[in-house]
Image (cartoon, rainbow, N blue to C red):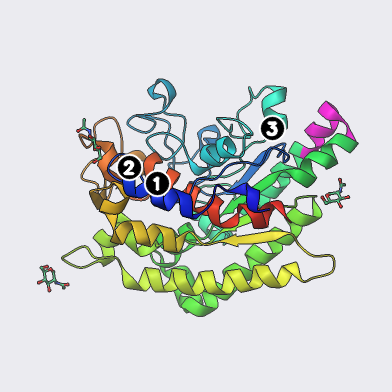
């Protein structure tokens, strides 16, 4: 399926000319004419949450300014960024739609439901304890929500069309960051039970079960994101990065170990009978490359978020009283946890370039 992308050499040359005008870290993904993806479905945490946390009691929310500062109508929707999330950006790139709604929004129109929703809940993890600590929706509960979504599709389009939609849609799964950042490294409970390698094994067996259950419900074309460089999040730098606020190496080491194990587990699922159709997507290396070479991607500040001091603020701490930076385009991070839309866009382009062929062939 070489036609999927414009030639990989061409954008690089192109970049030599316009490097100063646009971000040229990646090639340009073009959705092939003869492929249609009917819907985008997302599971996991705040990277993919479109505002589900607005609909039940929790402190982990983003439905107030300055969140959404650069979103349509400057609206704070519960997305943890200044504008779009990777859920929206990927849906747009694969020509599904511009905005993916949170499943818990009671006013979703039928056509919007049919083309996909997000079940993701900010601050959840694959460890059920993480969801409990943060009052978020556990991953396994998100699967139950998916089952109820399937029943709604049956009523709307019938069983045959439903299985066709489920078969051809793209599924995104983002989980694990909160298990480390606001569970394992923050509270003692898991630390006394597990060292880092055994906690990784515990998380990965849960993730593997999740993916297999998702497959049983009819999902193919499943993409599981690996952990980002969690040690380089501004909050990790503040807490564990020393006086210079360097990337916290113990966090990044845990993330790398987790990613290696997760990717080999997911690949082993593909050789099962019947094969579980899943791709592991490495987010860690493109993120670290941007953080190490910000200028080549058009960034100036990568160790602080745009909201508040940029060193600690996230969710309710990033609020209407927080000062925001004067130019968000200079920042990789929006708050002390989450990237800006500009950063997300670059990473999404990188992922589509590297994995779209493999996913569409599943
Ligand atoms: C799903 O797609 C695969 C390959 O594209 C095909 O072999 C299979 O029959 C499809 N199943 C359904 C239920 O549409
Ligand atoms: C912090 O940065 C300064 C200046 O770049 C350097 O001299 C010093 O060794 C660094 N300290 C640590 C603990 O990395
Ligand atoms: C904001 O920052 C970006 C990236 O450095 C730059 O291209 C742009 O000109 C800046 N905008 C203003 C208004 O300074």
Q: Earlier in the sequence, mark 1 or mark 3?
A: 1
Q: Which residues are magenta?
A: 150-159
Q: Percent x, y for residue 128?
A: 58, 59
Report the side of 236 relative to 270 (left or right). left
Tell me, yes or no, whether the highlighted magenta stretch contains residue 359.
no
Q: Nearer the viewer, mark 2 or mark 3?
A: 2
Badge 2 is on which residue? 18
Q: Percent x, y for residue 320?
A: 28, 30
Q: Are marks 2 and 1 in contact (CB under 8 Å)?
A: yes
Report the side of 152 relative to 208 (left or right). right
- Classify mark 3: residues with Cα within 10 Å, few (<14), some (14-19) or many (20+): some
Q: Secondary structure at mark 1?
A: helix
Residue drawn at (55%, 30%) of the image:
99
Residue drawn at (65%, 72%) of the image:
265
Badge 3 is on which residue? 115
Residue drawn at (76%, 56%) of the image:
215
Q: Percent x, y for residue 214?
A: 73, 54
Which quadrant of the render holds ligand 3? top left
Q: Earlier in the sequence, mark 2 or mark 3?
A: 2
Q: Secondary structure at mark 3?
A: loop
- Classify mark 2: residues with Cα within 10 Å, few (<14), some (14-19) or many (20+): few
């Amino acid at each position: 399926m070489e036609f999927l992308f414009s030639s990989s050499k061409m954008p690089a040359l192109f970049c030599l000319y316009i490097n100063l005008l646009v971000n040229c870290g990646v090639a340009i993904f073009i959705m092939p004419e003869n492929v249609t993806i009917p819907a985008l479905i997302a599971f996991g945490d705040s990277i993919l949450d479109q505002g589900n946390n607005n609909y039940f009691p929790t402190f982990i929310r983003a439905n107030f300014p300055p969140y959404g500062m650069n979103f349509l109508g400057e609206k704070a929707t519960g997305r943890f960024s200044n504008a779009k999330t990777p859920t929206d950006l990927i849906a747009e790139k694969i020509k599904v739609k511009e905005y993916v709604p949170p499943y818990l929004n009671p006013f979703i129109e039928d056509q919007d439901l049919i083309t996909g929703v997000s079940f993701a809940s900010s601050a959840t993890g694959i460890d059920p304890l993480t969801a409990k600590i943060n009052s978020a929706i556990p991953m396994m509960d998100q699967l139950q929500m998916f089952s109820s979504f399937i029943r709604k599709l049956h009523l709307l389009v019938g069983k045959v069309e439903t299985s066709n939609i489920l078969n051809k849609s793209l599924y995104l799964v983002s989980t694990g960051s909160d298990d480390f950042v606001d569970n394992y490294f923050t509270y003692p409970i898991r630390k006394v039970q597990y060292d880092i390698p055994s906690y990784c094994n515990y998380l990965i067996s849960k993730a593997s079960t999740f993916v297999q259950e998702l497959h049983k419900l009819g999902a193919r074309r499943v993409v599981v994101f690996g952990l980002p460089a969690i040690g380089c999040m501004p909050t990790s730098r503040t807490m564990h990065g020393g006086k210079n606020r360097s990337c916290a190496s113990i966090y990044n080491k845990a993330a790398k170990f987790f990613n290696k194990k997760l990717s080999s587990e997911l690949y082993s699922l593909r050789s099962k009978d019947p094969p579980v159709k899943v791709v592991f997507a490495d987010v860690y290396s493109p993120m670290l490359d941007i953080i190490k070479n910000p200028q080549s991607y058009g960034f100036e500040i990568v160790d602080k978020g745009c909201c508040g001091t940029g060193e600690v603020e996230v969710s309710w701490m990033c609020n209407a009283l927080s000062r925001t930076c004067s130019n968000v385009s200079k920042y990789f991070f929006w708050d002390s946890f989450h990237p800006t839309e500009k950063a997300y866009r670059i990473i999404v382009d990188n992922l589509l370039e590297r994995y779209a062929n493999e996913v569409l062939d599943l």
